[in-house]
Image (tube, rainbow, N blue to C red):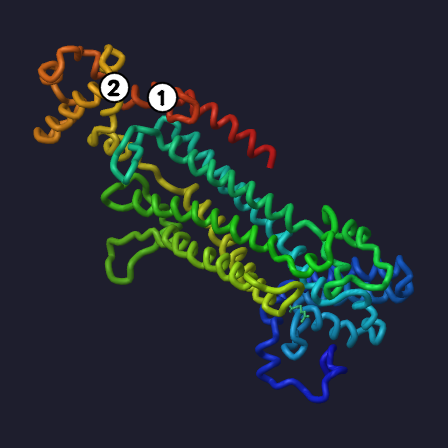
Amino acid sequence: MKLWGGRFAKETDQLTDHFNSSISFDMRLYKHDIIGSIAHVDMLGQQNIITLEESQSIIEGLKALLQDIEAGKIEFNEKMEDIHMNIEALLTERIGAVAKKMHTGRSRNDQVALDVRLYTRDEIITLKALLKDLMETVLNLAKKHRDTIMPGYTHLQRAQPITFGHHLMAYFEMLKRDYHRLNFAYDHTNYCPLGSGALATTTYPLNRQAVSDALDFSGICENSIDGVSDRDFCLDLLYGLSALMMHLSRFSEEIILWSSHEFHFVELDDAYSTGSSIMPQKKNPDIAELVRGKTGRVYGNLMSLLTTMKGLPLAYNKDMQEDKERLFDSIDTLKMCLPIFTRMLATLKVCEKNMYKAASGGFTNATDAADYLVKKGLAFRDAHEVIGKLVLYCVTHETSLEDLPLDIYQSIHPIFEADVYEAIALTTCVKERQVLGGPSAKALEQHFEKATTFLTTL
Ligand code: ARG
């Protein structure tokens, strides 16, 4: 018999049971469901809505049940639809009729909203720790490569010399914003919906604040209709995780490019790469590719839940049962992607010489050559034109600005002197970019300091 079976004259079809049921995926909420019930029942006892003895025996029963579930002794039943009714049915089997009082002044609508919030809160804490590990790894690697020169790109064409440390710190900033987004999602998750009931609270004298305090929420959901209808907190997290995956996918893409034979800027550690079943020479960046690939499902989860919520009338609708698999999948995906990405990065071998070589050949110092002329008194537009001509000369003669003899420089413009070589040396190009946020060691050290301090505040 269903817990709601009183109004029904016959049993539900098996297909209905299967279609309607969420136990196969919401069983992971068992702990949060029980913790929520304990707080609710404790309050019911304090408020004399049930007796203290009743609340005590329910709480003890719930604690014992939690232990047995954790010990793997319990099997859930699809006929009982979801985790909430499974737990209540199991408790009733164990402690008898008193268990039926647990649901006084509560609906599954506020119960599920509570469980998902409690679960999400815990998972955000885990995700934040994993993200912090990654940020530490990025920062350490950046510090190690403060002076490692590489080409910076625009349009994937060599643009200006930067350092690997500078490049990595761009990712640090992205991840920092991701961390803030996780905090944002946490803050909006951290309200207690319990007491909203089905949608209109209840006539029992519930103490919502006491339940909220017992469960360590920052406050209650102020409107009961919103309390059961709101899934914004899930969407906030799904967006935050999408942005994080977007960043990881860009980073992955670069690692895939860099580890190609054409770039050869990095080598992946054997422990974090894979081989080919047919081509013996292959060492593939599968992990970076999979992280890039999994970005699709995380975006999909966000779009899916946004679409589920679109146009839903207030208050609870069964459509909202679809929130959980999307939420769980994104959380699970990030819990896999973050640690493996961190380890892949921590073990990456950086081929500094290849990075330097790539920065040398491709006129990444052309802007600095133009700036050299500006310092000698030319207008930047004229300087740009002169260096353009020199680059064209180099391209047709297969040489570089560094290797061009002084008389060629002077044949194009007489203002060039021997100090041009020093001015366009890659180390000079980097060193002279002392503006905050730039690649020079001086600017980077300041960024490192702020980043280190930021991490200590987490
Ligand atoms: N399994 C349901 C869900 O995940 C729980 C709430 C059901 N409420 C209801 N009125 N049928 O949304």
- For label 1, count other residues whose C-alpha is less than 10 Å away and answer few (under 14), some (14-19) or many (20+): some
Residue marked by disc 1: 433
Q: Secondary structure at mark 1?
A: loop
Residue marked by disc 2: 380
- N-term mark: 2 or 1: 2
Q: Amino acid at mark 1?
A: Arg
| Image: 330 above or below 177 | below
Left/right of residue 225 with respect to residue 381 in the rendered view: right
**Ligand 1 is in which quadrant of the figure?**
bottom right
**Quarter of the picture holding the C terminus:** top right
- Point 47% across, 23% down: residue: 446
- Point 43% across, 23% down: residue: 436
Question: Could you tell me residue 314's position as x and y percent?
Answer: 65, 63
Labels 2 and 1 touching (C-beta < 8 A): no
Decide which of 426, 330 is in the foreground and name it. 330
- For label 2, count other residues whose C-alpha is less than 10 Å away and answer few (under 14), some (14-19) or many (20+): some
- Point 79% across, 60% down: residue: 40
Q: Amino acid at mark 2?
A: Phe
Question: Could you tell me residue 387's position as x and y percent?
Answer: 18, 22
* Residue 321 lies in quadrant: bottom right
Left/right of residue 433 with respect to residue 404 in the rendered view: right
Question: Could you tell me residue 137's position as x and y percent?
Answer: 47, 38
**Quarter of the picture holding the N terminus:** bottom right
Q: Secondary structure at mark 2?
A: helix
Residue 334 can be seen, yes or no: yes
Question: Could you tell me residue 224's position as x and y percent?
Answer: 73, 58
Residues under labels 2 and 1: Cα distance?
A: 17 Å
| Image: 416 above or below 262 | above
Left/right of residue 139 with respect to residue 49 in the rendered view: left
| Image: 453 above or below 186 | above
